[in-house]
Image (cartoon, helix red, strand yellow):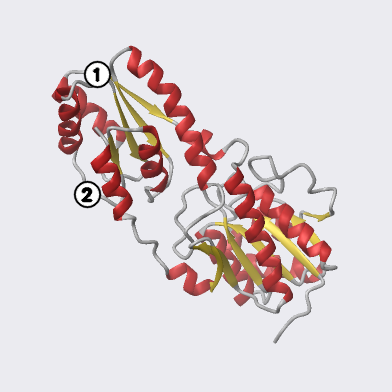
Amino acid sequence: MSVEIKKIGVLTSGGDAPGMNAAIRAITRTALYRGIKVIGIQRGYQGLIEGDLTELTYTSVSRIINRGGTFLFTARSNEFRHPDGVKKAAETCRKNGIDAVVAIGGDGTFRGAADLSKIGGIPCIGIPGTIDNDIGMSDYTIGFDTAVNCVIDMVDRLRDTTESHQRCSIVEVMGRNAGYIALHSAISTGATAVALPEIEITCDDIVNKIRKSINAGKTHFIVIAAEGAKISAGEILQSIGDSLGINVRLTVLGHVQRGGMPTADDRVNATRLGHYAVDLLTKGIYDRVCGIQNNKLVDYDVQEALKITKPFDTDLYKAFLETSI
């Protein structure tokens, strides 16, 4: 049965990602333009359970499009993993007149939205917000482009000292069990080798690649290793040092990749997705996950979206292999 939407809640959950604020802004301003009130839910599903709410206005979302992180804050909620917690969150919605919730995050956020709908009876829309870019039904996730550009900036700086000392730098990047940040940044920085979760590769393969580069006259090397790769950054470092006898250093970039001002792509696409989420709700379309495919907005049933695995871009990997040295 269709529900008339008079008030929506918006939350961010899981890991923060640059561009989340742009999405919140778009959701708020689109809803207000259409006569719908907006409630900001602080600290994700835990804040919803506890009733940590604030009304959002045109001015309260001013000057946030350029800010990283999420001004609504984010948290992971163990309580929400259980039906009683979901029911508490749904009761908060009913008590405060929230007719639907837009949840920005990754797979865990979408599972939470599915539970809030199925168990709690609150219609939901999901928006992909994660630097990992690992949401199967969307080519793009909010924060990915900014994270890659952060890695590029850090590696470009690191290359200066790597070249000066004629050494090899192993750079570990985030991405959980997906290698999108690693592959895109490896191409963009001209890395010699890359280790990805999706590709079977050995330390010997990387050593041989560097040896080939040495024979070609190269004296410094960058190796990008995804945190979820089949071989660890530490193993790569040890193997290169033992096999080639060159100076090797490891840099773990860590959470700097989640921070900073979002890029234009993240601001624009977050705005598109936020606007689209409200558009679906006003049309009586619920329990969907929004995404972008071939630069077009799409939406899938949340359960279907959770089952889709993103295919690895073998052509892009081949392009890296044939252009790196």
Query: The residue tagged with tag 2: helix, strand or loop?
Result: loop
Q: Nearer the viewer, residue 63 or 121?
A: 63
19 vs 224: above or below = below
Quadrant for residue 33, please give it: bottom right
Quadrant for residue 53, please give it: bottom right
Residue 252 appears left or right of 60: left
Q: Which residue is mark 1?
A: 219
**Residue at the bottom extreme, as displayed:** 1
Task: Judge whether residue 51 can be spotted in this image.
Answer: no
The C terminus lies in quadrant: top left
CB contact under 8 Å: marks 1 and 2: no
Quadrant for residue 236, please give it: top left
98 vs 54: above or below = below
**Residue at the top extreme, as displayed:** 165
Q: What amino acid is at disc 2? A: Glu
Residue 306 appears left or right of 103: left
The N terminus lies in quadrant: bottom right
Q: What amino acid is at disc 1? A: Thr
Say few, some or many: other residues with alpha carbon within 10 Å of mark 2 (under 14 / 14 to 19 / 20 or more).
few
265 vs 88: above or below = above
> Residue 194 appears at what percent x and percent y?
29, 39
Say few, some or many: other residues with alpha carbon within 10 Å of mark 1 (under 14 / 14 to 19 / 20 or more).
some
Mark 1 or mark 2: whose residue is earlier in sequence: 2
Please tell me the numbered disc located at residue 4: none
Q: Which residue is mark 2?
A: 200
Q: Residue at x 50, y 60 (%)?
A: 107
Q: Residue at x 58, y 64 (%)?
A: 112
> Residue 89 appears at what percent x and percent y?
69, 65
> Residue 312 appears at what percent x and percent y?
33, 57
Q: Residue at x 70, y 45 (%)?
A: 65
